[in-house]
Structure formats: C-alpha cells, structure tokens
Image (spheres, helix red, strand yellow):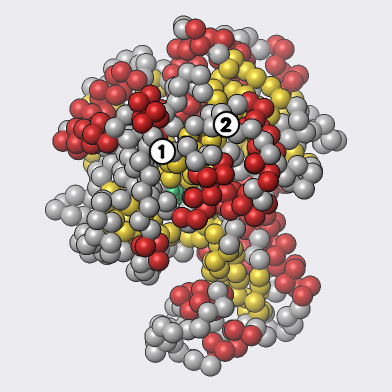
Amino acid sequence: MSQPTIESILQEKRLFPPSEAFAKAAHVNSLEAYKQLYEKAKLDPQKFWAELAETELDWFEKWHTVLDWQPPFAKWFDGGKINITYNCLDRHLLTWRRNKAALIWEGEPGDSRTLTYAQLHREVCQFANALKQLDVQKGDRVGIYMPMIPEAAIAMLACARIGATHSVVFGGFSAEALRDRLKDGQAKLVITSDGGWRKDAIVPLKDQVDKALADGAVPSVKDVLVVKRTNQEITMQPSRDHWWHELQPGMSAHCPPEPMDSEDMLFILYTSGSTGKPKGVVHTTAGYNLYTHITTKWIFDLKDTDVYWCTADVGWITGHSYIVYGPLSNGATTLMYEGAPRASNPGCIWDVIQKYGVNVFYTAPTAIRTFIKMGEHLPMSRDLSSLRLLGTVGEPINPEAWMWYQRVIGGGNCPIVDTWWQTETGGVMITPLPGAVPTKPGSATLPFPGIIPDVVDLDGTPAADNEGGYLVIKHPWPGMMRTVFGDPDRFRKSYWEHIPPQDGKYVYFAGDGARRDEDGYFWIMGRVDDVINVAGHRLGTMEIESALVSHPSVAEAAVVGRPDEVKGEDVFAFVILEGAQEPSEALAKALKQHVVNEIGAIARPSEIRFAEALPKTRSGKIMRRLLRTIAAGQEITSDTSTLEDRSILDKLREGV
Ligand code: WT7
C-alpha cells in the first residue's frame, strides 16, 4: 500500500448551494436540518436507527437488541422478524400504490414493459413458487446470471421472498468467473436467460452457464431456470434445465413472505480485493433493508410522482441497492434499461429520459466522460427538462465532468449528488443530501447521518485538514457487510486489521485514499490497495495476474492501472514469457483474449508489454509504483535505491 498523495483538485473552490425551490420540497430541506439529523445520530446511533426502523419499515416481529457489536461482527435488530419483499411489495398493495408503476423496463431493441406493484408482486410470487417447486429452500444459495430484464429483479425478489440467498453474477463475467462464484457459494440453482442484448448483439448467457457447469464442475447445482429473451437456439438439458415460460402458467400467485430473522443472509455479491480470489460479500436482511431504504429516500429525494433511473447493472451492488431494493421499499417507480450507447443509437440514454420523463438520474463518471466525448448535441437535441436531480457513483468525478453534467444534462438547475460507497457498505456513505448540503464539484461532501468517517494514517492518527490519508469508518452502520462468505477470518483481515483499533474501538478500512477539507468535505482520491477501477468496475490486479499466468506461455505477470481519459483507468500488463516463447503481436492478442475468457471483457488488458524482468526490491517484492509510472509513460523521479537491478527499468519502457 502506498500513502496517497494530494491531487490538484485541492484548487477546487466553487460552491453550489441547493436552489430555494428544490430545498423547500426536499425530505431534508436545509443544512440545519441535515446537521440536526447528523448530531442526533452521532449522539445516540442506536436510538436514531431504531426510530427509523420503527417508522420506515414493516416488521412481523420487533427486535429486542438494536445493535450487538462484537467487532468486527455486528448484528442489527436482533430478534426481529422481517421480509424485505414485504416492504418492497406487499405493503404498497394496501395503498393507492397498488396500481402505480413499480418497474418500467426498456429493452435494447425498443420493446418495453411496465409492471405495477400489483403485477410485480404477482410475478415475484409465481417465480418464488417455481423456486419452491424446484426444491429451493430457505438458506439455499441461488446463482443469478441475467441480462437487464425485469426477470432479473423478479428473480432476486423471489429468492428473498422464500428466504433463499441470491448471488447475482454480472452478465459480463465469463463462464470461468461464473463457475468460481457458483462454486464458492455452493449454489443449488442458477437462474439465467437464453441471452441478453448488448450493443446490437446477443450475449449468449445460457451457453456460458452450460460451460460453467460442464463436466459436473459445480456439483451443488441441480437445476437451471431459463428465461426466454433473445430466442436464439440453445441446448436444454432435460433433467437439469427448465424454461420459465413453461413453468409460469402452473404457478400460484400466492406465496406468503417467509418471516426472516433480521440477520438472515439476504445475498452474496462477489467483489475484487487485493488478493487473487474475489470475496463473497455477505449482506443480511433487516439492516440492509433499512439502510438502502433511508439512503434512497433522503439522497434521491424520491417523491411519489418521480420516475427514477439508475443506469447500473443489477449485477453490481448499485443495481441491488438502488435499482431494486431501495426504490421499491420506498414505493417508487424504478426504471431499468437493457441497452447502452452504441453506434446504431448513440443518444439512447437521452431518448429514454425523454420518453419516460425521468426525474432523477443516477450514473457513473465514466459514462459522463463518454457522453462528453460523444458530443453535447446528443443530449441537447432531446427534451431533458423533466430532470430535477442527478447522481454519480463508482469513482472520483473530475470537476470538469461534474460541471458538464450539471450544465448540459441538468440544464444548470439540478443538484448533483456524488455518492461515495462500496459493495461492502451496502449503501451510500458520503454524499450531499440534495436539499441541504451545498456541493463542490469533485467532492462527495459530507457523511450520511449515522456514518462517522475519518481520514487517518496507518497508525490510526487522524490527518490534519487537507492532508491525504486512509478513509475509515468509525462506527458500525445497519447496511455494513457482515462477513466474507465462508471466510470470517478474511473479513477481519481485509477490513479491520489494517488500522489498529483506536481506544479499543475497531475502525473499518475502506481501501480508499481521501482528504477532508477545512469545511469537513471529503475528497476521495481512489484506491490505495491493488484494486483498480476500470470504467467504474472494480478489478483486482492480482486476479488479472493469476489469469495471465494460467496461460502456458506466461512465466510471470504484473498488472497496474494506467490513467485513461474516459475509463478512469485501464488495464496495463507486464508479462514475462516462459523460456522458449517469443514475444509477438499474435501472442499479445491471445493473452488479452485469455483474460477475457478467464474473467470477462471488462478485465481485457489494453496493453501487454513483454519484459525480461520486473523491478523488484531486494526482498523480492514487485515495485508496482514504478510499473505504474512506466505504464503512464512518465519519468521516474521517485527513489529507486531499493531496486535490485536498475537497468531493467529502461528495458521495461521499451518492451522486448
Ligand atoms: C470503490 C467501490 C458502490 C458503488 C459502485 C462501486 C470507488 C465509489 C465513489 C465516489 C470516488 C468512488 C471507491 C470505492 N468509488 N464511489 N463517489 N467517488 N470513488 O462499488 O465496486 O464496491 O467499488 O469505488 O474506490 O472503494 P465497488
């Protein structure tokens, strides 16, 4: 790990207070109101969260203990009985929202569907009954490998309805990556579709599932449930595979929600860390329900008339928390879009906003930089006047992209919420509340009520204002991850032992560098571990290195992130070949494809540089800092005295 350095955005001084009109109608409507909430939560966190749990959620049975904290293991609302789908569906059926649009879906080819709360409830119940018929029981794990179609959300909710734990694997991951995740989670069933639409082509999801399960590679998987989407020919294995449209007609629309313990596992979601193997991040029921509910309500300021659109994929935590659970728990209308900007329709995002009159729009900085590149004539030629609030997530946003987003997409009058959080945190942690907190371009601003972040050095000593350090969280919160699936020790080591406990109090280590300015605003500076962020996708450099060395021609590999104007970072790989192998264009191409096969297209190296040796310290550690400098094409000015053999640096610069 390297000490983060302070960047030039230190110069950013622009301040944008919410407009009076926006603030007046907002759930949290002034800086004073925010500060009051924040102080209240700080003074007595348990009281704060208990009051919200009482007023915002419906319970079958009330908890007896708000927080049981045995660091690093937390239990929230222990003793309570709850089902997140009751809060996302059933309770709205008792009100006028019964016939309100719950889910608006737009397919890439232009087909669309709207499901009211009553219709979504019905479909979830039917799907849940199908799972039961396939012998899925409470506590079983179910893999979901789906395109962005309503059935992806329905499948997640159906699992939650009967108490099965879902493990969604992003549809862009390869068969190999899918297999590893299904194996680790010992999934009993996989839900998939024949394919999905991606940039005018079919992604053959079912074929990938077949590959992942080939030769009994994942013995725990007994059945595969297949939704028909793209209609191309696929092979169905009679004893294993079932078409959803054949099962559905026989399924009852009545399926009572399973009363879950607050701490029953809701889902596992795999994410990259600084070692080779992805971590199965575990989230549980009640705390996650509450945290995603209240963050959605206050940060996106949802009103019953809003159409809310988050452009993430349900395969990521953003899709879990802010397409599915958070919005539905609030009774909102959530929009789901299968497509992405593509040659045949570069302005599709703006078409969707115009078509549905989207009011709240949440996307990633990398998408914004792509929009900037494609040209402002695309959004400018659509009517985007329905927008009233914009959000970003996934990586630091550069102030100029922020300004463009505000001016071109927001028409100069939408607040922007830059939301910092992680798969592990369950929901947003540092963010402006849009009617309350004046924003600064490039800053995620202030912590959500109940969240106590700090910037510290490796001893845990708080950094001075504007001094860079490590971002930590000092008090447990309801949405926090509970453990790494099957590996509590890794949970402790990865998140709770980097920084020594302060006065006996454990702090959560986020893995990001940050600084806090004189106004208490947080500026996130990016990862300080061996994790890189490519177009908002989190990738472990070690994961890509293990993929590379699994190729017979590769002896050793080192992967670093290289700054990229649009993607934030791209994947740059230094490769040392096995004895007799000769470097060639063709081999570089083959190695890139190998990484795609092992992990997925998101991990494809943009450059492979063949080398004779890697810079190592005398104790044999690869000096990634130097490799990053070389990959970025910059001069090495830092100290190289610990380097064993200086001559290899020049060779690395040129390649062999
Ligand atoms: C990492 C978490 C949770 C949403 C999607 C990513 C980076 C996330 C911001 C932001 C600066 C951000 C951090 C973090 N990140 N949001 N607003 N500003 N950086 O989830 O895949 O778990 O990645 O994304 O580096 O640690 P994830």
Q: Can you give x and y, in whole percent of width and height, for residue 648 in the image?
A: 55, 89
Please tell me which residue is depicted at 58% across the width and 57% down the height of the picture: 567
Position of residue 110 measured from the top left corner of the image (x, y, whole percent) = 76, 30
Relative to 579, residue 311 above or below: above
Nearest the camera: 21 or 156? 21
| SS class, disc 2 | loop
**Horizontal and vertical percent for residue 586?**
79, 73
The part of the image, by quadrant, that contains residue 385 is: top right
Residue type at the position of mark 1: Gly
Q: Residue 313 at x, y = what percent?
A: 59, 39
Q: Nearer the viewer, residue 557 or 444?
A: 444
Precedes in sequence: disc 2 or disc 1: 2
Whether residue 643 is visible, yes or no, is: yes
Q: Amino acid at mark 2?
A: Ser
| In this picture, residue 227 sits left or right of residue 51 | right
List the residue tagged with mark 1: 427
**Mark pair 2, 1: CA separation:** 28 Å
Picture layout, residue 154 above or below residue 452: above
Mark number for residue 536? Answer: none
| Residue 460 position by quadrant | bottom left
Which quadrant of the figure contains the N terminus? bottom left
Q: Is mark 1 within 8 Å of ligand 1?
A: no
- For the point 48% across and 74% down, the residue is 624
Q: Quadrant of the C terminus?
A: bottom right
Q: Residue furthest right?
A: 233
Q: Secondary structure at mark 1?
A: loop
Residue 198 falls in which quadrant of the image? top right
The answer to whether residue 74 is left or right of residue 170 is left
> Which residue is tagged 2?
385
